[in-house]
Image (cartoon, rainbow, N blue to C red):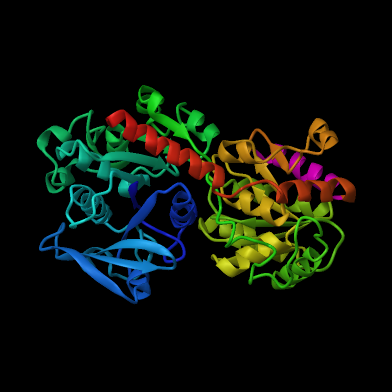
Amino acid sequence: MDVLSVTSEIYPLVKTGGLADVAGALPAALADHDIATRTLVPGYPQVMAAIKRGRTVAAFDDLFGGPAELIAARVAGLDLIVLDAKHLFDRPGGIYVDQTGTDWTDNWQRYAALSWAAAELAKGLVEGYRPSIIHAHDWQAAMAAAYVAFGGDTRTKVILTIHNIAFQGQFGADIFPHLRLPAQAFHMSGVEYYGGVGFLKGGLRCAHAITTVSPTYAREIRTPDYGMGLEGLLNERGHDLYGILNGIDAAAWNPQTDPELPAHYAAANTRARAINRAALAERFGIEPGEGPLFGLVSRLTWQKGIDIVAENVDWLVSLGGALAVLGSGDVQLETAMSDAAVRHPGRVGFVRGYDESLSHLMQGGADVLMVPSRFEPCGLTQLYGLRYGAVPLVSRVGGLADTVIDANEAAVEAGVATGVQFSPVDGPALGEAIARTVSLHQRPDIWSRMQRKGMKTDVSWTNSAGKYAGLFQKILGEAQ
């Protein structure tokens, strides 16, 4: 089976979040199920720089405002088709935002081009290659489903995965004449959304199947609290909606071999974690102490619950804990973390930005990994935490609820607990969870058992890749 994965980012070439990790790891896992994946990705500067040997397999004289080429290449073990459209992707700044942090005004054009190229590939643009399935990721690739549906292609099936429904790709109606879609597509059964154009909405309407990244999130997004206005459509298409948990790249995230860790260790013996903990504390200017070292690796946003962490920093420190924060985002929340570090020297440390190497050390050295999100489709941080023996402290939402077993009395007694959950997602509940975590940490027998149980949890792609393979077969079987 040939699958064309379409994504706006892919690890290790270009990454802003978990989407890149999924897009980079899933193809290898699917290969174990005899599924060959090629990934269509934009030709950002960092992607083009990574191509050492590529070949042009197709060219466009005018692709949404300029010439473009499709370049086939193998990079970092990934089979790629790179959309080299310099007028759309060869620019400084972030991949979605300019150097001031403002969304590129032509994002609709950039990702419509990516989706249109995917649909053309599915129609046989490149001789000898015609995928039977397009696997589109998030709003940036969702229009591929619309281009297939309104382009008369009855052979190709499109699976759309929602990684975060909060990001929908909504634009004004004025862009519609430039989208290369027939007039009938500007309708509620197509891409029209409250008088404008909705990329994700159009994909949800036109895809043959819809997945999201955890079973709980699949249920949540069918409700007004989490559906972000699309819950009606998702309920209408409920029989086509599947929740499949993300996994992690178990080779890249392995505490026994991770080159970013000063000391390696396994579930059977975690004593070497103390070396990593000391290195982490030194990096963040945190003094040695007996209390738990909490780690937070996150975008600093309201969605991620960083405001309620800020509310609880003084409480955490008063209980004997320490806090290391790695992230960037909202200016007010960055300031709150910076102020906390000034207020509690030697107990709170803050590194602004994102550092892949340091994030590995956070997993390998922190006692606790905090993921207090208000909503979290799946979350990868807690999966890395489980793998590395950093006990997750998480809100009871989305994939966090699906992957962490709360250390309630029964779970502790049965020896199955892997972390601490809290609900509702507010400051008092988080404060209570922090206190419970500190108490658990004071019981080395319970704590080490939780670490070992978490480290033995299968958080790889093995099971989830099988579910994707089964879904792909099911969708193709229905088409026969």
- Please tell me which residue is depicted at 39% across the width and 68% down the height of the picture: 75
444 vs 227, nearest the viewer: 444
Report the number of numbered marks.
Answer: 0
Residue 440 drawn above or below residue 355: above
Q: Position of residue 446 (x, y in %)?
A: 86, 45
Residue 95 location, quadrant: bottom left
Residue 427 part of the magenta segment: yes
Q: Is residue 355 visible?
A: no
Q: Position of residue 402 (x, y in %)?
A: 61, 37
Residue 476 drawn above or below residue 8: above
Residue 387 drawn above or below residue 288: above
Residue 401 location, quadrant: top right
Q: Is residue 269 visible?
A: yes
Q: Position of residue 392 (x, y in %)?
A: 69, 48
Point out the residue furthest to the front here. Answer: 34
Q: Is residue 187 left or right of residue 296?
A: left
- Please tell me which residue is depicted at 70% across the width and 64% down the height of the picture: 256
Residue 334 drawn above or below residue 159: below
99 vs 419, nearest the viewer: 419
Q: Is residue 432 left or right of residue 121?
A: right
Residue 110 location, quadrant: bottom left
Residue 466 part of the magenta segment: no
**Part of the protein shown in magenta:** 426-441
Tell me the chief SS of the magenta region.
helix
Q: Quadrant of the C terminus?
A: top left
Q: Position of residue 64 (x, y in %)?
A: 16, 57
Q: Is residue 75 left or right of residue 147?
A: right
- Please tell me which residue is depicted at 22% across the width and 43% down the height of the picture: 172
